[in-house]
Image (cartoon, helix red, strand yellow):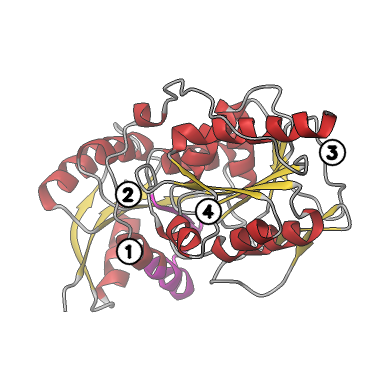
């Protein structure tokens, strides 16, 4: 059996030794190298070509964010960031690392790295290693000023845009939110597969990056009315659904091993709003969101799926297309003008 080759990056020799010793107990893994700073990480990644990298963020000389940018631009490799989520600055830098191409982020405990934490890390490392990463140059996501698509007037004016994403999602969502016009007429509900340790940092990071109002949803708050663009995000470890015109946070079972689940949000919106919604499913591993997008389409909603050409992982969009849930399949740079055209087409129909 081929062993999983891991490069450990951390400026603490004690942490590197603890990680290496723990990984040595797993016969499916092999530590092929260690690095104490980002420059060493970049050089060893080029030389050793590991299957996955565990990346500390706070390091001397070249930090983990810059190392992630260098690796993803020159020798793309799955990266799992180890970060102290309770530190606000480090949490925001974690979001930057995910946008730069890191596959996942794990909260690094301040004390001892116990067996439970190491088991969780190994599971996340194995999952990350399955991601077929791409060269990640930030300019790749800059808008190329596409022409707005022509969209026929909709039968029912949309009241809400719902979006879901997983692996590669932070950068994709950032691009969309930054590219929507200031007069975009719909509120947005968002599900990202992110843990409760990083949800507040993610919301703050998206708000800073987009200039929009972005925060975690609050149980019982009213669903925003059309006319103002704001974003409410599912907090970590809670399903976000819409019931009787309000946002509800649900402690239900995981779905496709996910909580929050895109399917849970999409299916609730299909029941609550039917055709008066737009659903958008972006890059991600697995199949969460595909069935929910299919429910939205059956209810008459407009549905948009990210094309394989721009996905970091095509799993979730592929499943939606397979189910016939995708009304529009377009690349990332074409999604914001399409969503805008759909929202405005509905507004014209509603005011006619």
Q: Which mark is residue 10?
A: 2
The answer to whether 87 is drawn above or below residue 318 in the figure is: above
Q: CA distance from mark 4 to mark 2?
A: 43 Å
Q: Earlier in the sequence, mark 4 or mark 2?
A: 2
The answer, for residue 262, to whether it is visible in the render is no
Q: Which mark is residue 19?
A: 1
Q: Earlier in the sequence, mark 2 or mark 3?
A: 2
Whether the residues at callouts 3 and 4 have beta carbons within 8 Å, the answer is no
The answer, for residue 9, to whether it is visible in the render is yes
Foreground tag (2 vs 3): 3
- Where residue 33 sits in the image (x, y, percent)? 18, 56
Q: CA distance from mark 3 to mark 1?
A: 49 Å
Residue visible at 14% across and 44% down in the picture: 46
Whether the residues at callouts 1 and 2 have beta carbons within 8 Å, the answer is yes
- Where residue 216 sits in the image (x, y, percent)? 71, 46
Q: CA distance from mark 3 to mark 4?
A: 26 Å
Q: For residue 283: magenta? A: no
Q: Which residue is mark 3?
A: 225
């Amino acid at each position: 059996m081929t062993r999983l080759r891991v490069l450990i990056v951390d400026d603490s020799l004690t942490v590197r030794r603890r990680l290496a010793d723990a990984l040595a107990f797993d016969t499916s893994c092999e530590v092929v190298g260690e690095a104490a700073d980002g420059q060493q990480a970049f050089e060893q990644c080029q030389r050793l070509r590991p299957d996955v990298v565990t990346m500390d963020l706070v390091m001397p000389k070249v930090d983990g964010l810059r190392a992630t940018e260098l690796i993803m631009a020159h020798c793309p490799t799955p990266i799992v960031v180890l970060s102290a989520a309770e530190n606000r600055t480090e949490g925001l830098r974690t979001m930057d690392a995910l946008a730069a191409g890191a596959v996942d982020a794990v909260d690094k405990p301040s004390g001892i790295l116990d067996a439970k934490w190491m088991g969780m890390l190994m599971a996340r490392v194995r999952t990350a290693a399955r991601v077929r990463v791409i060269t990640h140059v930030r300019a790749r996501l800059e808008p190329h000023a596409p022409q707005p698509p022509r969209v026929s007037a909709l039968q029912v004016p949309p009241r809400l845009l719902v979006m879901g994403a997983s692996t590669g999602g932070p950068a994709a969502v950032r691009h969309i939110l930054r590219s929507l016009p200031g007069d975009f007429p719909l509120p947005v509900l968002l599900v990202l597969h992110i843990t409760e340790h990083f949800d507040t940092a993610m919301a703050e990071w998206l708000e800073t990056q987009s200039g929009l109002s972005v925060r975690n949803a609050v149980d019982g708050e009213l669903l925003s009315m059309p006319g103002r663009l704001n974003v409410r995000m599912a907090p970590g470890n809670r399903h976000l659904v819409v019931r009787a015109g309000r946002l509800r946070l649900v402690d239900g079972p995981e779905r496709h091993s996910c909580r929050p689940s895109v399917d849970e949000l999409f299916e609730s919106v299909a029941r609550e709003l039917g055709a008066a919604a737009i659903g958008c499913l972006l890059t991600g591993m697995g199949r969460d969101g595909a069935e929910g997008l299919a429910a939205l389409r059956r209810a008459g909603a407009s549905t948009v799926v990210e094309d394989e050409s721009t996905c970091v992982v095509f799993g979730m969009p592929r499943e939606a297309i397979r189910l016939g849930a995708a009304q529009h399949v377009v690349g990332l740079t074409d999604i914001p003008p399409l969503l805008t055209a759909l929202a405005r087409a509905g507004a014209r129909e509603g005011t006619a």
